[in-house]
Image (cartoon, rainbow, N blue to C red):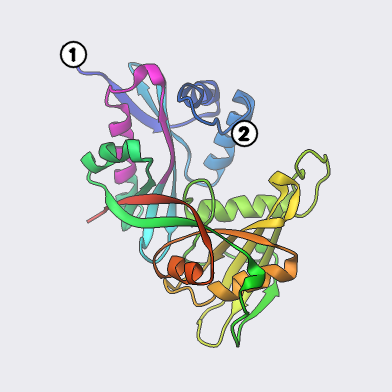
Amino acid sequence: MPQDQINIRPAAAADAGAVFRIHASAGGSIPWLDAEECREHLEWIAGLGNPTIVAELDGEVVGSMDVWWGQDVPELGRSLDVSMIDVRADRQRRGVGRAMIGHACKLAESNGCDCVSVRADPAAGGFYEKMGFTPRLTLRDLSIAPDAVTMPAGFSLDPVKLSSLAIPPGGWFRVGRILHPRQRWRDMLALEAEPPLWGDSGQRRPAVSAFLVAGPDSGEPAVAVYRLGHWANDASKAELCLWSGRSDRPELLACVAHASTLGVRELSAFCYGGQADTLAEAGAARTGTENVLYRPCW
């Protein structure tokens, strides 16, 4: 039997319809409302220098993958993160996903990355393990009341515009999946530049508040971004994104306590290791757990 011919290439705007159908066939949530919105995404991400990758099987686009690379959390170093990958439902088990992951690994090596990372659903863990991936981080999705935390001595948070800053090293996120720091930074910049609609209110209001965080022994200032709950039309809920180059995150409790000054009563954060333990000791409730797998580039 002849082997399937798989071709991997950067996506073009003309691939938008095929890419939209790939994700629609997967049965989960679709990232875009329609093919036109998908085309805008393809053009946007290509303009950032890391275009969406598509896989052709016998000349037909049947697979799509988004990747981001750059400095990641300290435990991952410089990583290439596979943030989104899907194969059209009727073309699965033909080696398309394996070919795209193989391409991601080559991209990582050519861009000087330490590893390739992916947030894998439990059902897909076996696929990635066969590709050489192993568990690296266990993320805990935690929710905490900021007014239950006392501001540590010696910390200050000064308002700042993200548009005035270069992306700092490191990152830690609370989102539906782990996102590469570069990707999350771009998302927050977009929210800052164009405030979103709040729930069903039809009104646009600021949805992000950013601060430079300095402490008595924290080295370079970290950057904390509070993503206020515009999706629920409720500013008393927020997600915390913290860019810090230190794995011990000395700024963590200060950022949590500061949220109460913004009127936030419920703060969410994805964290891991010692940071998760710190929030748990402060009374945070766990709402979920996810695993990040990685494959070293050496």
| Image point (55%, 53%), residue name | 184
Residue placed most toward the observer, 184 or 48: 184
What secondary structure is found at the residue carrying circle 1? loop
Residue 1 part of the magenta-drawn span:
no
Give the residue number, with chain letter if any, for mark 1.
Answer: 2
Q: Which residue occupies the foreground of this view, 125 or 168?
A: 125
Residue annotated with mark 2: 40
- Which residue is nearer to you in this view: 291 or 63? 291
Horizontal and vertical percent for residue 54? Answer: 42, 30
**Relative side of 285 to 71, left or right:** right
Q: Dot 1: within a 10 Å radius of its alpha carbon, few (fewer than 14), some, or many (20 or more) residues?
A: few
Q: Is residue 282 above or below residue 73?
A: below
For residue 121, say whether it is visible.
yes
Q: Which residue type carries mark 1?
A: Pro
- From the top left corner, tell me how far across and down residue 199 is, in percent: 75, 42
Residue beneath the point at 26% across and 38% down: 126
Q: Position of residue 285 (x, y in %)?
A: 52, 59
Q: Farthest top residue?
A: 1
Which three-letter amino acid code belongs to the residue tagged 2?
Glu
Residue 94 on the magenta segment? yes
Please provide the residue range marked out in magenta: 82-106
Q: CA distance from mark 1 to mark 2?
A: 37 Å
Q: Residue, x 31% and y 51% (percent of image)?
A: 294
